[in-house]
Amino acid sequence: MAAKSEKFRTCPTTGFKIHGPAETLIQINAVTAIVFLLVGGIIGLALALTRWQAIHLLNDTLFYRLLSLHGIAMLVAWIIFFEMAILYFASAVVLSARLAVPWLGWLQYLLMLVGGAIVAVQILLGNADVMFTSYVPLQAHHLYYLGIILFAVGAILGCVVFFATVVAAKTEGAHTGYLPLVTFGAAAAAIIAIGTLSHGAIVFIPTWLWAAGLVPMMDVEVYRLIFWGFGHSSQQINVCAMVAVWYLLGTLTVGSVPLNEKVCRSAFVLYILFINIASEHHLLVDPGLSAAHKTWNTGYFMHLAVLASMIHAFSIPAAVEVALRKKGYTKGAFEWLKKAPWGNPGWSALVLSLIGFGFLGGITGVVYGTEQINIIAHNNLRIPGHFHATVVCGTTLAFMGITYYVLPLIFRREVAFPQLAKIQPYLFGIGMMVFSTAMMFAGGFGVSRRSWDMNGVESAFAVDFGPVVDIALAIMGIGALVGAIGGALYCVIAVATLLIGKKINA
């Protein structure tokens, strides 16, 4: 009876019943995510223009300080705030159900907002010049660690709300049968998120107490082991959420349906079981793990997660091709591809995200994650090039694509500047692909990561990288500029849609 009294509206286009509290929480989490994306993007451009030695924009102190904030704003805040919106969408909206315990959703948002703000302020004040990894014995102000703890606990609460909503949908009859694939994928992301964010809370609570002077210094090896259960695994939340969005975008853009949902679901299960294993490549020089353990982990076990990505990599394009051929595009081998809706930003974002993640991020991840190669590559620009391909070219671009459907459905506004929206994914996607490729190329020549001044590196190690590296870093900067224009367009379109977009009566 309680469910019947809840406030719903019905979307005339999709037929979804949208619960009022869910709609509000989706809106506020998505808007906050875009704010962090804007901040992190501006900082990222400044960092790229600093690595471009001909410009060398920032001084050394500001470079390292903003590099820490860039990692927090982009990898943690932008991504996870948007994923909270996805979790509420994939549960309450997709299942046409009420959002369970909305007050807990608001607590999620407040904890994440306050925690993220505390972390950002401490970094900007110079109280947390410890980089994203914040390895002990490097020590930040105790409020920095408290902010991360609050953020992690808030995100865990968001996952709890998601699962409670799924259970409520089943018990109250709002949804029957198997969960839709997008909801199943979001559930996989939430399961991984709980484990990942729990690692964050576990490792940062004693570190917070140590920074406050209440306990002795943490064991360095224990810190590194538990930290990477958070630091690297946070990217694996993104992978599951991104793949779920891929399936949703395929359906929304061309009406695709997976050819075998059971296989797709099994791939999500493989993610849950094995994707976090890949984080061990950060620990290859640590003495606490045996050589045999490291070899089995990075040489064999992590490939079970790779198998999951390969399943999705074949499943989604196959479903898209079948859907387009059913529309009559059957001439030759590739008419379906030529006739695809390339002017639809949701479609272009999907395709570019698949290419960026699959070819640049996924393949390089398999290569760089193996023990022998990672020993060589881990501390040069190849690794940042890889994870920018996964998180930026892949996850961020997919989230941008789904935004063009969330704006009319959830915010009830027509997308502003539709002609700019058509080119936005191309600018962002191609710019960031160029950026990531150039970064990996420079890393292949031995250019170190996190280095403010290449001249200083050359002097310290008595090496001369030569003009090829200078050209690669310049191309990296140009790619960043193009990508930044695309990212700025996304923010402008989203904000303009909320402020001046034509209202949709629904």
Image (cartoon, grey):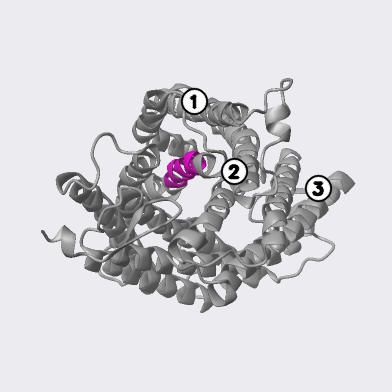
Where, quadrant-wise, is the N terminus in this rendering? bottom left
Residue that carries the numbered disc 2 in the rendered image: 350
Name the amino acid, label 1: Ile
Q: 92 or 142: nearer the eye?
A: 92
Contact between marks 1 and 2 (CB within 8 A): the answer is no
Question: Which residues fall within the magenta stretch?
Answer: 236-248
Which mark is on residue 472? Answer: 3
Q: Which numbered mark, 2 or 3, is in the foreground of this view?
A: 2
Residue that carries the numbered disc 1 in the rendered image: 311
As drawn, is 87 to the left or to the right of 282?
Answer: left
C-alpha distance separating marks 1 and 3: 34 Å
Residue 455 seen in the figure:
yes
Contact between marks 1 and 3 (CB within 8 A): the answer is no
Name the amino acid, label 3: Ala
x, y percent for residue 291: 44, 26
Q: Which numbered mark, 1 or 3, is in the foreground of this view?
A: 1
The answer to which of marks 1 and 2 sits earlier in the sequence is 1
C-alpha distance separating marks 1 and 2: 17 Å
Q: 408 or 360: nearer the eye?
A: 408
Name the amino acid, label 2: Leu
**Disc 3 element:** helix
* Corner quadrant of residue 360: top right
